[in-house]
Image (tube, helix red, strand yellow):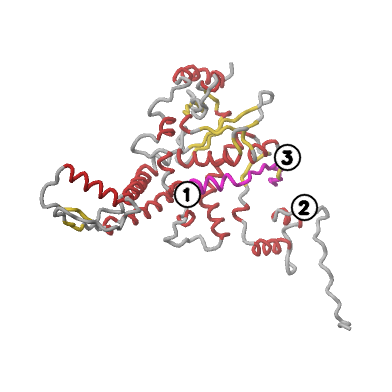
Amino acid sequence: MSLVDRILSRFRPKAEAEVSSANIRRGDGVWQALTGGSKGAPSESEAMAVTAVYACVSLIAGAIGALPMMIYRRAPDGDLTPDMGHAHWWILNEEFCPRWTAAAGWSFLTASKLLHGDAFAEILRSPRDGSVVGLVPLLPQRVRVIATPDGSRLVYEIQPDPTIEVRSPEVARVRVLDQDDVLHVPGFGFNGLRGMSALRNALRSSGRLAINAQEFSKNFLANSARPDFALQAAGNLTPEQFDHLQAMLEARRSPENAGREMILEGGLTIKELTMPLEEMQLLETRRFQVEEVCRAFNVPPFMIGHTDKTSSWGSGVEAMGAGFVRYTLRDHLNAFHNEINRKFYRRPNLVAEFDTAELERGDFKSMFEGVRIGLGRAGEPPILTVEEARRMLRLPRRMEGTLPAAPPPADNAGGQQ
């Protein structure tokens, strides 16, 4: 029996006996994900109900999901050549597996990393030669990471998929996978098992405060913004009078009746109420929470529509795109690159990388000015060939290797007749 088999045999019987096919224990990670969880750290559904959290996560996940992943062959001198015909290109760019498109898969994995601290996907391998044939994203709440007794490797206990209602015995059982069969991309604070969850750390207080401020705003406005008056009676009202008055006030509170006049009878008088909204600073609190959430995800507030303050990234789209890639996306992209290359290839002559050129691409004039400089202008030595320049611009390659010659200047010596 191999070392991996001995490791798996140690954990598999206990794991498979812990959870039955139909039981999701109240309070466990899956239950919290599906029901909203408990108070304290916000659940994923609660956090994503805050527009700032939703905007930050969808911005980063959507950007990564839209990036093409290139597969390169590395020459001994370090030169990288794209391999568009590699079998993994289809998996990484079009379809993880029949149930998941690549774009949806990358977005899901990125959101899992952002919110839960870890992204997990099962690596499907061919039984014939062990080559990678697909990826299946996993809810982080379904995965328990276990270190081997000597601490040199990891194994993963995978709970049944709660999104599958009718489960076959194979789907219903708890599985234990070796680390070579799991794509595990941890986030910041990785301790050898898991990364730090933004829901339980960075968003534990600020996220809960944003949720409470949003709920208060909703209830505040649902009550016609505020009770601006009270009705005072000279004596005690009978239950029938009180119920009649309460029904009249409830009818007036509806949006279609707001602002209509009231007719008072029976000695009722109006006492105006004042509420110092400036002291509540509700809007200021919500603005500050947007900045807090953006700080947790390392997203500049202006990129999610919070434009109270100017950006130090420059005013052009080129500067914003380059800054977003450099300061926000690079950490996530590098983590995905590193895990894919070590689990898919494990050799230096093949590498997979996201292509960020589209996000960092400048405006049309700047692009062609850069190409002009690269090809050599005003007698300067060129650093690009025409084929390389056309590839940078994503234009068809010209086999002859030269651009068509410029037409000769018109001969106007004779003038017009």
Query: In the rendered view, does 406 fall on the left or right side of 142?
Result: right
Disc 1 to disc 3, how far (Cα)? 36 Å
The residue positioned 21% from the left and 48% from the top of the image is: 245
Mark 2 lies on residue: 397
Residue 128 located within the stretch drawn in magenta: no
Q: SS for tag 3?
A: loop
Q: Secondary structure at mark 1?
A: helix
Mark identifier at residue 85 = 3
Amino acid beneath label 3: Gly
Frontmost residue, 237 versus 88:
237
- Report the amino acid beneath label 2: Arg
Amino acid type at mark 1: Ala
- In front: 212, or 385? 212
Q: Which mark is residue 55?
A: 1
Instruction: For the N terminus, give its image quadrant.
Output: top right
Pair 1/3: label in front:
1
